[in-house]
Amino acid sequence: MTTANTTARPEPPTVRHDQPLGILTRFRRSPEALRGAVILFAATFAALMWANLPGTSYEIFWHLPLGVEFGDFSFDLDLQHWVNDALMAVFFAHVTLEVRRELELGELRDWRRASVPIIAAIAGLIVPALIYVGITAGTGAVGGWGVVVSTDTAFVLGMLALAGRGMPAALRIFVVTLAVSDDVGALGVIAFAYTDDFNPLPLLLAAAGLAVIGVMRYLGVWRGPLYLLPSVVVWIGFLLSGVHATLAGVAIALLLPIFSTRADDLRRAQSQMRAFQMTPTAISARSAENSLARAVSINERAYNALTPYVTWFILPVFALSNAGVRLTLDSLVDAFTSQLTWGIIIGLVAGKTVAITLSTWIVTRFRRNALGPYIGMPHIIGVSLLAGMGFTISLFVTELAFDDPVDVSRAQIGVLAATVLAAILGAVAFAILGARERHRSPAPGRLLRPLDPARDHILGDAGSALVSVVEYGNYATPYAARAGEMRREMQSRFGHEVAYAFRHLPLDQSMGRAAALANEAATRQGRFWEMRDELIREAPIQTERQILRAAAAAGLNLRRFELDWVSAAAAERVDQDVQDGESMHLTQAPSFFVAGELYRDSIDADSVNTAVRAARDSTVRRNATAEMESNSES
């Protein structure tokens, strides 16, 4: 352990730095996911009400033709097909953009972390289909097995935000990975099982459009609108070929460029922003905008641009145009005496629950810590029940799988019934789980993750030290430098008696997270503490230049550092610390744990070190008592 003396004692901060927690907590507390599910539910309810009004206005409206004419050439589709073939192509492009990002940069990149929800998703595709086929065997409805393979991501995330409040933040990662993997399987089902009247010639047109997109990607074209025209060409080629036009969105999204933001691009953008601040002209503003856009991949820009349209327009319009089932006593009796309807309900609700729960349980038998420290099988049961909400893609497949309007009606009623039943069962499961966890939750203020020399950055010997001190810190706060001084004074006072560890709590500050990632990147060169000291000298971190200056002062190889700075390993470690902080409800940085207990007094050297001394003395007394008892027994 290195020690240092200091004569300057920081004054206690007069203002505590309270900030909202990171992105995972914002997801739990934000109404966005819930509002998306509510608007989808409202559109479904409106469709049902409209379809059951007297007359046939619902059918007439959605079958109105809309198209274009140029001389002898004409092209038109009815409104429902524009929704199902055009708008849903955008939806599937949006899904594929997320899948691609997760595969390249996100949760699915780390197989060990993603394997459990991926295996659960595969089981959730196969088992419901087998159940459906078993129930409908001997009928003409067997071909509708694709209806039960999908989970509605919007509904599941919305219900998790509503019913799963207070659940571990890691559960959201599990659900998103499960849903993304499920979407991949559903897209494959649509591509290979529900393509009729195939005409290969128009696919040459689609191939030409995709080739243009590929060449643009190779040439590094970064202006998103330039990809629009070849994308339209690809969609027309798929539509005319008989391959479902929505798959055009999948093919396009797979080709769009994706990359992590590079340090050179960040520096260029920052330079252009400074130029605009010095000379705020239209030309410098355009240069700054272009440099910012160039720094972010088209995949990410397209995904963020499409998200509000998918959430607030495309999915509600799809529900409005496809969920309008005429519900009469006769139609309900017919549906609920039909093998088709029950095949869908049992396949979605029971099939998803059994498949996801059982496959996850089997994996955890072989890998005890596969779910991490915060997720248990009760959480998985709740998620598997919600996964039976197979709304959007299930309704979409009913139009592809069945030609008979009676079968379509039965399938739609089955999908709606399964969605409602799964939502109710999932909400009940999470209500029971939440009550149990509140009853059994550990006392607040305890360190959730024990000090681990194999994982943590520690000064001192954790095995022989009398007291452990764990700091959750943020380099973007003005208190970071004071925390560094307290640490050095603590080392000077207590020496080898204290094991001191640092973990990250960047709160909701982008530069705080950037500095945390930089600190972890320095670990690759064995200079974590040197980098930490330099970051503290620069604190509060407000610019990337400060981080690079700290890296140079810490003696890092800057070229290697810039590569490690954007690595998935650094992000995973920071995310783990953030999740721990959220689970312990930490809302300020620095936060200290002394001997495993949250320190709640003033953040100044004297006060913190007084708590450390008390913990050390307590340990000394316990050790002395234990030694006396041992001697008396012998």
Image (tube, helix red, strand yellow):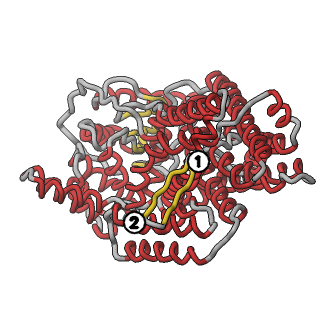
Relative side of 311 to 414, left or right: left
Image quarter hosting the C terminus: top right
In the rendered structure, which amino acid carries the disc numbered 1?
Answer: Gln
Q: Residues within 10 Å of mark 1 (few under 14, many from 20)?
A: many
- Residue 462 appears in the figure: yes
Q: Taking 307 as reference, is 233 above or below it?
A: below
Q: Residues within 10 Å of mark 2 (few under 14, many from 20)?
A: few
Task: Report the disc number at residue 229.
Answer: 2
Is disc 1 placed on a helix, strand or loop? Answer: helix
Looking at marks 1 and 2 on the same chain, the residue that comes earlier in the sequence is marked by 1
- Residue 354 appears in the figure: no
The residue drawn where x is 87% and y is 40% is 338
Q: Quickly name the residue at label 1.
A: 80
Front position in the image: 137 or 5: 137
The residue drawn where x is 76% and y is 39% is 414
Point out the frontmost of discs 1 and 2.
1
How far is disc 1 from disc 2 in space, using C-alphas?
A: 24 Å
Front position in the image: 134 or 49: 49
